[in-house]
Image: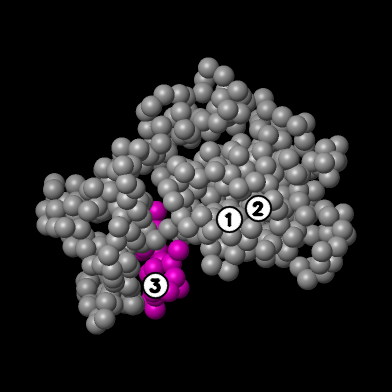
Amino acid sequence: MSAGRTRIAIIGAGPIGLETALAAHERGLDFTVYEAAPTVAGYVRRWSHVRTFTPWDMNVSRRVRGALGERAPSGAALPTGTELADELLEPLAATAALAGRIRVGTRVEAVGREGLLKHEAIGASERAQRPFRLLLTLPDGRDAIEHADAVIDCSGTYGNPNRLGDGGIDAPGERAFDDRIERVLPAFEDQADAWAGKTVLLTGSGHSAQTAARGLAELASQAPATRVIWSVRRPDPDWYAVADDPLPERAALNRASAELAAGGSPAVELLPGTVCESLSAGSDGRIGVALRNGGIEHVEVDRVLALNGGVGDASIYRQLQVHECYATCGPIKLAAALLGEGGGDCLAQASHGAETLVNPEPGFFILGAKSYGRNSQFLMSIGWAQVDDVFSVLIS
């Protein structure tokens, strides 16, 4: 694909999407960034109150630092999501390199090939000669079609949370209570009235769930009627602890979770090895929950906080020839490389090279957290390296 004719569509205006856009600008390519949220960094703002485990110096790439110059944040402070958006991503989007290239409030619903279906021209050069068709929902709600020669999906995983029920599917009754199930980590200090004095079912054992458990325990110290039923699927959760953790805040969260699991707060009851069997209408407007661990335990709660992680939305590229891992949902070559490593901490991760990002669909790439599928060890520096890997093979 020659640089002179390449139109690049970038899906998502988060950290990796904007990094990709900067790389396209550096190479003089025609590009457009499509962001479903009304502002850049839409998903980052959904965890706006949460601090990263990593400092500014690990969250600003060489390319971004060059674009922002002295305005680029630096140092050992741990930014919140709000700070990451306001002090890094919004200023970056306003630079001359990216201004006018980002279409906010514009959702990419699906991507196909002009004149071809998924099963046609398998392994043939014809697919590379046809432009991509992007189905968009515009800010005013209308549908539109736009074209691109290459598509880079940086849409992440945060907008596609996993379901509550056993086996990763909906628990019976879950869909009926969708509007009452919170699937994003709340800012308890700003929403105290909605959580204080309530009985809350919390599910999940990752860092978001751990942060929620700690926050609810702190809230309960001021509102003693608050009760947390913490349902964790693993019978013996390890809280994803890292030996001699070099990230102090992550280590502190792991210790707090272990303390809560050991009974450190009278408000928090951990139920390890437990899954949600069903939801139903309870008394006085509450939600009845059946929890299974061998037998069935019935509880009634006021709120459900399901923080079970997420995985990228594969429906966007359903009509493309994308080879996914059957276990992780990531691109198969990258997934195989990650599985071959047998895990490890995110700080030990490195780029696995351009070849692991290439799909059978020519010109289509998945970058960022979405490329790791169900592997949670993605770090932004990996995404920066992925961007360079992709452009090394995209333009010949």
**Rendered position, 117 above or below 32:** below
Q: Which amino acid does label 2 sit on?
A: Thr
- The percent position of residue 5, horizontal first and vertical second, equals 85, 41
In which quadrant will I find the N terminus? Answer: top right
For label 1, the residue is 337
Q: Nearer the viewer, mark 2 or mark 3?
A: 2
Q: Nearer the viewer, mark 1 or mark 3?
A: 1
Q: Is residue 188 left or right of residue 67?
A: left
Give the structural element (helix, strand or loop) at label 1. helix
Tell which circle, 2 or 1, labels the residue nearer the N-terminal end: 1
From where the camera sits, is residue 94 visible? no
For label 3, the residue is 165
Tell which circle, 1 or 3, labels the residue nearer the N-terminal end: 3
Q: Residue at x 14, y 53 (%)?
A: 264
CB under 8 Å between callouts 2 and 3?
no
Q: Tell me if mark 3 has few (under 14), some (14-19) or many (20+) residues whose alpha carbon lies within 10 angstroms of its own.
A: some
CB under 8 Å between callouts 2 and 1?
yes
Q: Which residue is drawn at 47% across and 44% down?
A: 348
Q: In this view, does 123 lie to the left or right of 282?
A: right
Give the structural element (helix, strand or loop) at label 3. loop
**Does 186 lie within the magenta span?**
no
What's drawn in magenta, residue-wise?
162-184
The colour style of the image is one colour
For label 2, the residue is 356
